[in-house]
Amino acid sequence: MIHISNLKKHFGAFAALGPLSFSTENERIVSVVGPSGCGKSTLLRLVAGLESPSAGRITLDGEPITGPDPRVSVAFQEPRLMPWLSVEKNVELAVWDWEADQRRQAVSAVLAKVGLTRFAQALPKQLSGGMAQRVGLARALVGAPKLLLLDEPFGSLDPLTRIRMQEHLIEIVGEEGPAILLITHDIEEALVLSDRVLVFRGPPASLQRDLTVSLPWPRERTSADFQALKALLLEDLLPQRIAASA
Amino acid sequence: MAELILKWLRTEPMDVGVQHQHKLLVGRQFVLPLIVPVVILAVWQIIGQLALVDPTLLPTPTQVLGEIYDMALSGKLAENLSISAQRVLLGFAAGVSVAIVLGALTGYSARWRALLDPLLQALRTIPGLAWIPLFILWLGIDEGSKVALIAKAAFFPTYLNFMSGIVRADRKLIEVGQVYRLKGRLLVQRILLPNALPFLFVGLRQSMGVAWMVVVAAELLGASSGIGYVLLDGEMTGRPHVVMACMIVFALAGKTTDWVLECVARRILRWQDTLAQD
């Protein structure tokens, strides 16, 4: 799947990321967690082709990623909808280069999948935060990408909507969906959704822990195993606080 | 036809449930703006009636409105207003057409901006009156120089606003376009231009206002028709009520064209989530 080798990113004298190396195989969702500003989003922008690496290489199924790539899609922290386009047209934007019939069918199918068929003609200003985020997700999924990058996609939602959206994400993506690289600062979100969690520290971003989450599905947030993993990740991210409370 | 245009200009379809709200809106849009002018007219009429100011300098509102009525009855108003409006619309169309093309070019491309913008900004600072002799020399005393003067004045507000709208496009939305491999013309067409439309309409309304201001200057300098010419004639023949009548006609004409542009903008920009759209 994704293979990242000796990846580095500098902004002038500032080293934002790397050297970083890791690979993913058949995991459905891999989460990247880490403190704010550690370089998680820089990794996402590099994989999305929005930034060029200063050194190193990113490949997807053996093919290098050197810029925006039809095999890779992104759902951002904010829905980033074009306010002048209807929900339908916003989703169509991701497949603008498809044949009209194919495009219409794909948009209609993905809107049904996220439960927004009735709102196809609505403008973004008429949507709630959760609905707008679902449109952003539909736009990211409509082109049937191999890899979906999610940049703290539920970070701006209220806690209840966030939990609903997390459950919804698993349903929407399903078994047939793309592999997901989820950038989040929410440890619980990472454990609820992921097969594997990569803990970053930085800047420059580097891998602190690579954790395979083998808890049964659906994840039970209150189970002892879940809480134990959460504590383990918290210890990585807040070592001083844990030490002080001990 | 007029009904169709008005229906199109209306941003939302009428709904029985919002009739009360609509009445409040009509009040806010049409009644509130009339209060201050009516008070001014009343005070002005009282001053005139009591002869507190020399009537040869300050005619009463009824004299001024009477003059407008007479001009309308004689056909002089329609004849001269249509000539002025034609000059304004031709100059406006020419000026903003060039402004939209150059604004898009300099807004999108840093190279074109570096090439053209400093020159255009330098030209912008030349006073409008300084262009008149040149335009008359180049284009003669007839319509050409008047339309060119209006076009030049209408150019800058639209150019500046449209260019700024494109330059200040939301980077986050551009990134969405980049993720989906939009670049060049497609990026401009699908993201940069729609995003800059609110700025464009601000520029268009300013250009239209400037065009009405400049038509007066153009008609004061060697015209034999148009409301500006009638205004000058009023001054030459010592009839202040004619001068004031022409000023009111200009104000109403300018306000009308601005209202049309505002309605078009409201319709086209109905996607905006702003206070003005509530």
Image (tube, rainbow, N blue to C red):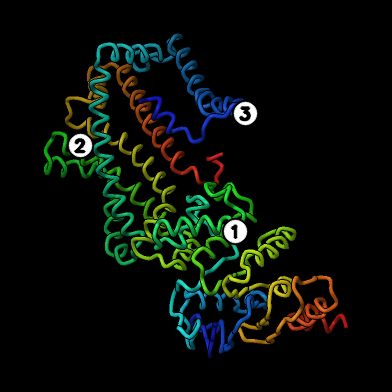
Residue position for label 1: A113
Q: Residue at x 22, y 30 (%)?
A: B219
In the image: residue B4, left or right of residue A144: left
Residue A20 visible in the snapshot:
yes
Residue A97 position in % (x across, y down): 39, 63
Q: Are marks 1 and 2 in contact (CB under 8 Å)?
A: no
Say yes or no: labels 1 and 2 on the same chain. Answer: no
Chain of residue at mark 2: B
Element type at marker 2?
A: helix
| Foreground label between 1 and 2 | 1
Left/right of residue B98 with respect to residue B42 in the rendered view: left
Q: Is residue B30 above or below residue B276?
A: above
Q: Which mark is residue B251?
A: none
Say if mark 3 contacts mark 2, CB within 8 Å: no
**What amino acid is at disc 3?**
Gly
Q: Amino acid at mark 1?
A: Lys
The residue labelled by disc 2 is B146
Mark 3 or mark 2, whichever is nearer to me: 3
Nearer the observer, A29 or A203? A29
| Callout 2 amino acid | Lys
Q: Residues within 10 Å of mark 3 (few under 14, many from 20)?
A: few
Q: Nearer the viewer, mark 3 or mark 1?
A: 1
Please identify the quarter of the rendering in which residue B116 is found.
Answer: bottom left
Chain of the residue displaying label 1: A
- Tag 3, which secondary structure? helix
- Disc 1 packing (10 Å; few <14; some 14–19; many ≥20): some
Position of residue A166 relative to residue B144, above or below, is: below
